[in-house]
Structures are given as C-alpha cells and as structure tokens.
Amino acid sequence: MRNNKVDPENVDQKLFEIFRSVGYDGASMESLSQATGLKKASLYHRFPNGKQEMAQHVLKNVEQWINDNIVTVLADKAISPSIRLKKAISSLGKLYNNGANNCLLRTLSIGPDAGIFKETVTHCFNLITQSFTELLIEAGLPGSEAKKKANLINPLLQGALVLSGATGDNSHFENCLDNIGQFLQTTN
C-alpha cells in the first residue's frame, strides 16, 4: 500500500508558487491539484471553500513571512539599524529570487476577484511601510521624512519586479534593493 501523505509545508509552497505565478484568476483547480500532487477532492478536504480559501491561506502565510522577516527584523533593537536594514533587504532578495519571481501581493491584487484579498494585501503593504518608517526614525530621520522614504519602498519594489519580469533583466530589482539600502546613509 502506497503512503499518500503529503507534507503540508510542500502543499503551502506549491500553492504559493501557483498564485504568485498566475494570480487568483489564472489558477485553476486542475493546476492547483497538479502542483500540489493532491487530487481535487483532497484539496477540497483541506480547503472546504476551495480556491478562495487556498489563496487566503497563502496570503496569510505571506503576512506571517512579512512579520517574521521584515517587521521583527527591523524592530530588533539589539542589532544596529544598518544591520537590520541589510537583513530585511536580503530577505526581500531571497523572497523574490533577486527579481525573478512575481509578488503574490501584486498578483492577488489584479483581476475581477481582487477585492476578496484587498484588506489583507493592504495590511501587508502597510506592515512593510510602518516597519521601515520606525527603523528610519530610530536611525535619526524626522518622522515626516522617514514616512516619506518608507512610502517609497513598496512602489520601488513593485516597479522593479515588473521591470525585471518584463525585460528579463533582474538588475532593475537588484538596483532597487541597493537604493533602499542607501536610505540610512542620509541619517548619519
């Protein structure tokens, strides 16, 4: 008898990859089934509300990733602000495969069903902005200037990801991360 157990983390990763690649509207139950190695019935058993529940589950995992790798890292006062910034930037580089991967927040923000995810997507973007704002204030920027710079982070990242994807040239994303890394230099 064959062992049909599937690692839940692998299922989560495969769902993430599909939704990140093709968005909510582009993901079919067939493609989700093939990617995870689970039959449609097994997917519905795990996610009774179907594709929407799967996408919301993946989005919650991304929200947790942001909390673990951006919010917590940038708030760790035991480490200097410059090291925290480098760690957060490194995490973003890994998440997006240095510009080769789409952003799940963006792919779930497109299409007729985007409204389903708007609140959580907005919250995720706000977490990033707030965390960078607090780091920049701690590093010595006045609150308004820190907020202004932090408000640039999401548009810079998203724009660089779009350019990198459209041109096949990841240097756009790498340059974006380098530019974000310079944000603290103006505080010294």
Image: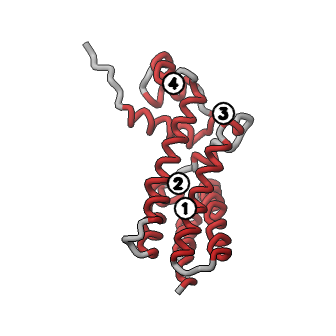
| Nearer to me, 70 or 16 | 70
The amino acid pointed to by label 3 is Asp
Q: Earlier in the sequence, mark 4 or mark 2?
A: 4
Q: Considering the numbered disc 3 on the image, is that residue within a helix, a strand or a loop? A: helix
Element marked by disc 1? loop
Q: CA distance from mark 3 to mark 2?
A: 21 Å
The secondary structure type at the circle numbered 4 is loop
Q: Residue at x 45, y 36 (%)?
A: 12
Residue located 63% across and 64% down the image: 156
Quadrant of the snapshot with the N terminus: top left
Residue at image mark 1: 170
Separation of residues labelled 4 and 2 (CA atoms):
29 Å
C-alpha distance separating marks 1 and 2: 6 Å
Q: Amino acid at mark 4?
A: Phe
Q: Earlier in the sequence, mark 1 or mark 4?
A: 4
**Residue type for callout 2:** Ala
Q: Position of residue 14 (x, y in %)?
A: 46, 36
Residue lying at the far top in this picture: please name it: 1
Q: Is residue 38 above or below residue 88?
A: above
Q: Mark 4 sits on what residue?
A: 47
Is 132 rendered above or below residue 21? below
Q: How is the image coloured?
A: secondary structure
Q: CA distance from mark 1 to mark 4?
A: 35 Å
Q: Which residue is mark 3?
A: 25
Dots 3 and 4: beta carbons under 8 Å? no
Q: Tell which circle, 1 or 3, labels the residue nearer the N-terminal end.
A: 3
**Badge 1 local density, few (<14 within 10 Å), some, or many (20+)?**
many
Residue under circle 2? 100
Mark 4: give few (<14), some (14-19) or many (20+) Cα within 10 Å: some
Residue 55 in which image quadrant? top right
Which residue: 54% across, 23% down? 30
| Mark before the other along the chain sequence, 3 or 2 | 3
